[in-house]
Image: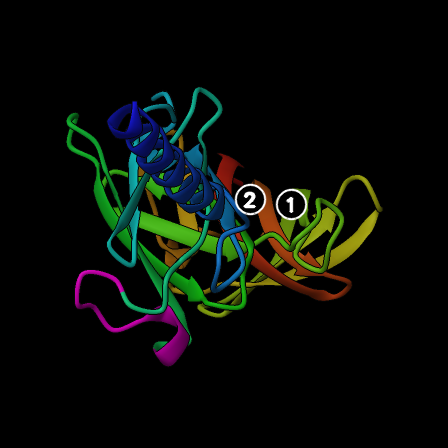
């Protein structure tokens, strides 16, 4: 009888111990804020699904869902012996899939929600803000080019009836159909569709799609 009672006490103590431990594991993640994002396939992946892409960041992996969305509960300050995003101020991300996708890109570690414009070997990552209407909201332009250079493009935007300028960076995807282009392939009078990020007059072109050459 004493032996049975002793066993019950020990089992109760063990259950309590593991119960508390489990509760702490399911609590709010510690460390940096969560990082979420969405992959948009473009360029040589324009017709491909955005599902099932492995996204690696600071040694952690998330796989995109049917809509291309991914999320990290937290990004630890140290992971797999790598230099932390906190110390470098940058999230270095890699995107892979068995069909040949192998691309990398980076974004400042202040970002909490990102948009990834993905090609097989190139990823353009932009901060889309913590809310859909945050400072990094996306904006689309469509119309003829009125000015273009290595660093910017100006479009006579059909929706506003006036010129809008967006910066061109090394991450800007420029294409005609599935053919990759450079800014030198764009000319005044060409009709384009431009996807941008930013706010107000501070816009950056994430993708420029040549529609009708002049």
15 and 50: which is toward the camera: 15
**Alpha carbon distance from label 1 to label 2:** 5 Å
Which quarter of the rendering shows the N terminus? top left
Q: Which residues are magenta?
A: 79-87
Q: Secondary structure at mark 1?
A: strand
Q: Is residue 12 visible?
A: yes
Residue name at image x 34 percent, y 22 percent = 48
Say which element carries label 2: loop
Q: Quadrant of residue 89?
A: bottom left
Residue at the spot 17% in from the left edge and 25% down from the top edge = 99
User: What residue is shown with label 2?
Assistant: 190
Percent across and percent down for residue 195 are: 58, 45
Q: Is residue 85 one of those drawn in magenta?
A: yes
Front residue of 126/73: it is 73
Of residues 167 and 109, which is closer to you in this image? Answer: 109
Residue 114, horizontal then vertical, whole percent: 52, 50
Badges 1 and 2: C-beta atoms under 8 Å apart?
yes
Residue receiving disc 1: 144
Query: In the rendered view, does 53 fall on the left or right side of 131?
Result: left
Q: Where residue 128 sits in the image (x, y, percent)?
A: 60, 52
Q: Quadrant of residue 193?
A: top right
Q: Give left or right: position of 191 versus 125.
A: right
Whether residue 84 is in magenta: the answer is yes
The count of marks equals 2
Position of 35 compared to 52: left or right? right
Residue 103 vertical position relative to residue 69 in the rendered view, above or below:
below
Q: Which mark is residue 107?
A: none
């Amino acid at each position: 009888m004493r032996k049975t009672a002793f066993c019950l006490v020990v089992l109760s103590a063990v259950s309590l111990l593991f119960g508390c431990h489990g509760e702490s594991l399911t609590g709010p993640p510690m460390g940096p804020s969560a990082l979420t994002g969405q992959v948009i396939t473009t360029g040589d992946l324009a017709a491909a699904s955005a599902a099932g892409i492995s996204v690696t960041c600071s040694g952690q992996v998330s796989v995109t869902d049917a809509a291309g969305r991914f999320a990290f509960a937290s990004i630890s300050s140290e992971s797999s012996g790598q230099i932390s995003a906190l110390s470098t101020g940058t999230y270095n991300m890699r995107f892979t899939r068995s069909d040949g996708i192998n691309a990398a890109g980076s974004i400042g570690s202040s970002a909490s929600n990102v948009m990834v414009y993905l090609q097989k070997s190139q990823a353009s990552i932009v901060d889309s803000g913590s809310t859909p209407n945050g400072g990094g909201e996306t904006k689309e332009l469509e119309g003829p080019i009125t000015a273009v250079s290595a660093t910017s493009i100006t479009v006579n935007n059909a929706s506003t009836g006036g010129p809008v300028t967006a910066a061109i960076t090394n991450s800007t995807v420029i294409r005609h159909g599935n053919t990759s282009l450079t800014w030198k392939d764009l000319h005044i009078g060409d009709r384009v569709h431009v996807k941008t990020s930013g706010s107000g007059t501070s816009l950056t072109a994430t993708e420029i799609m040549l529609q009708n050459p002049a």
